[in-house]
Image (cartoon, grey):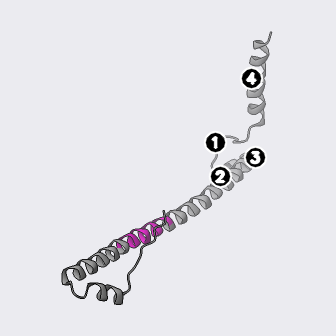
Amino acid sequence: MKEQAFIVSAEDLVNNNFNNKKRLIDAVNQIINAYQTTFEKALRVEGLEQALYSKEKEIDNLKREVEFYKNKYKEMTVHSTTIKGREEHELKENVLDIEKYYQGKSETEDELADLFK
């Protein structure tokens, strides 16, 4: 939505309205109102740009935080496989349990097999 405004030069404004003081005042008021509206929009845009910048920084910080916790989870998963690692990281059980993974998978496979008998 791009609008172009025709802006009259000061010389044309005065020359065209020299003999009519009321028309000159009305023309100047229109210019002042247009300036005020434009200024208010510029202030809103500046505020929105600052808010956008702030949100972009917040997103970047959250992305770094997500990566940090992903790495921590991976680290804890690896350390949870040994008794010493569990003790050092105060873990109650093995986070990475291959037997549980395969046990759960075989139950699902059995259920699927029963469906097609």
Left or right side of 9 for 68:
right
Q: What residue is disc 1 on? A: 92
Q: Which mark is residue 82?
A: 3
Is 54 magenta? The answer is: no
11 is higher (above) or lower (below) than 72: below
Q: Which three-letter amino acid code belongs to the residue tagged 2?
A: His
Q: Distance between the residues labelled 2 and 4?
A: 33 Å
Q: Is the magenta stretch mostly helix, strand or loop?
A: helix
Q: How far apart are marks 3 and 1 (CA)?
A: 11 Å
- Sequence-earlier tag: 4 or 1: 1
Q: Residue 89 carries which label?
A: 2
Q: Distance between the residues labelled 3 and 4?
A: 28 Å
- Residue placed most toward the observer, 100 or 86: 100
Give the magenta range: 40-52
In front of the other: label 4 or label 1? 4
Q: How far apart are marks 2 and 1 (CA)?
A: 9 Å
Q: Which three-letter amino acid code belongs to the residue tagged 4?
A: Thr
- Sequence-earlier tag: 3 or 1: 3
- Sequence-earlier tag: 2 or 4: 2
**Label 1 environment density (alpha carbons within 10 Å; few <14, some 14–19, many ≥20):** few
Tell me the quarter of the picture where residue 6 sits: bottom left
Q: Which mark is residue 108?
A: 4
